[in-house]
Image: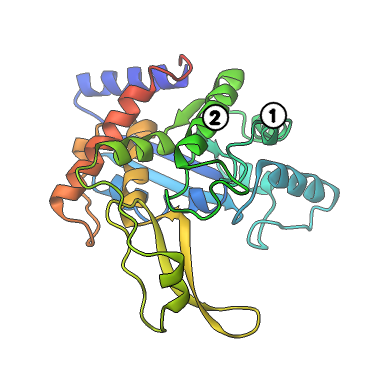
């Protein structure tokens, strides 16, 4: 209903020559929500008459269950501040009149259907209690890079199976609670399929083991996820680490374009901001994919 109201209001404003839109958005998530903070504010700033207040209650790797356990701890002890040591969730929810509050599962649990409830329900009701005016929106996260070493072991057999399972879990949850979805994971999967240069693994586990500091390995072509970097292990030895799960610059720009199109109800063609590391052609492709993902996902999402 809120989406219909927002779109109706936008049409009414256009009719009188005014398109001003301001959203106050709070994320309750983890690093997969943190990644939108780099580019989304710049994207919104590049579009006339759009304004954004974007804040977070995120903890790295935090599952729905852990977020709820942090709520329980802070309700027993108001001095307990699990978010950056500065605030608890109730304080953040009541700090502003949020228009939108986002929820999501941690990526390492996203494909497990048993990991969503009752934690999502508890958080949903908590947000409803302390930010009743806000629309609760779910961000669909993405599956890991195709060369993730966990596939076939603790995770799914491959990135496609991971995506299919997390997709089903997010859609089921959204339908149960009548929530809108920000289809970030849907967009990443679509971009993987439609990009002209497909993913090509550029190094092996042996290459990682033999790498010599400070040299890093070339990132795979066609990747939306990943980076490699040097870090000391527990014994103090330098080790090359590979990130197979977090979005790279291409992925973060795509994610932010999806958030803009979904939350503001505006076309990605209005976006003027392009990160310095992306060519104009690449940025155009990513904006087009983001718009297509938002448009097509509504066919499988709950009715608003």
Residue 184 locus on image (x, y percent):
41, 38
Q: Is residue 114 visible?
A: yes
Vertical arrangement, residue 228 with respect to residue 283, above or below = below
Q: Residues at badges 2 and 1 in contact (C-beta under 8 Å)? A: no
Where residue 258 sits: x, y (%)?
Answer: 35, 38
Residue 284 image position (x, y, % from top left): 18, 43
Q: Looking at this rendering, what residue extends furthest in the top direction?
A: 303
User: Which label number is shown at residue 170?
Assistant: 2
In percent of the image, x 79 and y 58: which residue is there?
Answer: 79
Q: Residue at x 57, y 22 (%)?
A: 172
Quarter holding residue 304: top left
Task: Look at 34% across and 17% down and name the residue there.
Answer: 8
Residue at coordinates 59% horizontally, 45% vertically from top-left? 155
The residue carrying pointer 2 sits among few (fewer than 14), some (14 to 19) or many (20 or more) residues within 10 Å by Cα, namely many
- Confirm whether residue 137 shows in the render: no
State which mark lies toward you, 2 or 1. Answer: 2
Judged from the image, the secondary structure of the residue bearing numbered disc 1 is helix
From the viewer's perspective, tell me whether residue 189 is left or right of residue 48: right
Distance in Å between CA atoms under marks 2 and 1:
13 Å
Query: Of callouts 2 and 1, which one flags the residue occurring earlier in the amino acid sequence?
Result: 1
Residue 121: which numbered mark, if any?
A: 1
Q: How many marks?
A: 2
Which type of secondary structure does the marked residue at label 2 adopt? helix
Q: Position of residue 136 (x, y in %)?
A: 55, 30
Residue closest to the eye, 96 or 255? 255
Q: Is residue 86 above or below residue 213?
A: above
**How many C-alpha atoms fall within 10 Å of the one at disc 1: few (<14), some, or many (≥20)?**
some
101 left or right, relative to 62: left
Residue reaching furthest to the front: 206
């Amino acid at each position: 209903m809120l989406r219909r109201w927002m779109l109706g209001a936008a049409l009414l404003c256009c009719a009188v020559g005014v398109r001003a839109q301001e959203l106050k958005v709070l994320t309750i998530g983890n690093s997969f929500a943190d990644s939108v903070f780099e580019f989304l504010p710049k994207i919104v700033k590049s579009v006339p008459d759009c304004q954004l207040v974007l804040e977070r209650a995120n903890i790295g790797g935090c599952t729905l269950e852990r977020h709820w356990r942090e709520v329980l701890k802070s309700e027993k002890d108001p001095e307990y501040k699990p978010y950056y040591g500065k605030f608890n969730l109730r304080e953040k929810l009541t700090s502003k009149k949020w228009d939108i509050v986002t929820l999501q599962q941690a990526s390492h649990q996203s494909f497990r259907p048993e990991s969503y409830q009752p934690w999502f329900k508890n958080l949903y009701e908590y947000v409803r209690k302390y930010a009743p005016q806000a629309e609760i929106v779910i961000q669909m996260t993405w599956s890991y890079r195709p060369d993730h070493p966990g596939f076939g072991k603790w995770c799914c057999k491959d990135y496609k199976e991971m995506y299919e399972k997390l997709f089903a879990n997010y859609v089921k949850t959204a339908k149960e609670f009548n929530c809108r979805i920000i289809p970030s994971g849907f967009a990443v999967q679509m971009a993987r399929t439609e990009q002209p240069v497909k993913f090509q693994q550029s190094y092996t586990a042996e290459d990682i083991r033999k790498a010599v500091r400070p040299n890093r390995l070339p990132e795979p072509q066609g990747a939306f996820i990943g980076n490699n970097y040097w870090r000391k292990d527990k014994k103090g030895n330098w080790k090359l680490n590979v990130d197979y799960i977090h979005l790279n610059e291409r992925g973060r720009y795509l994610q932010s374009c999806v958030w803009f199109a979904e939350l503001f109800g505006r076309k990605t063609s209005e976006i003027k901001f392009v990160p310095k590391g992306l060519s104009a052609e690449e940025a155009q492709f990513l904006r087009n994919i983001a718009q297509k993902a938002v448009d097509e996902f509504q066919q499988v999402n709950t009715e608003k």
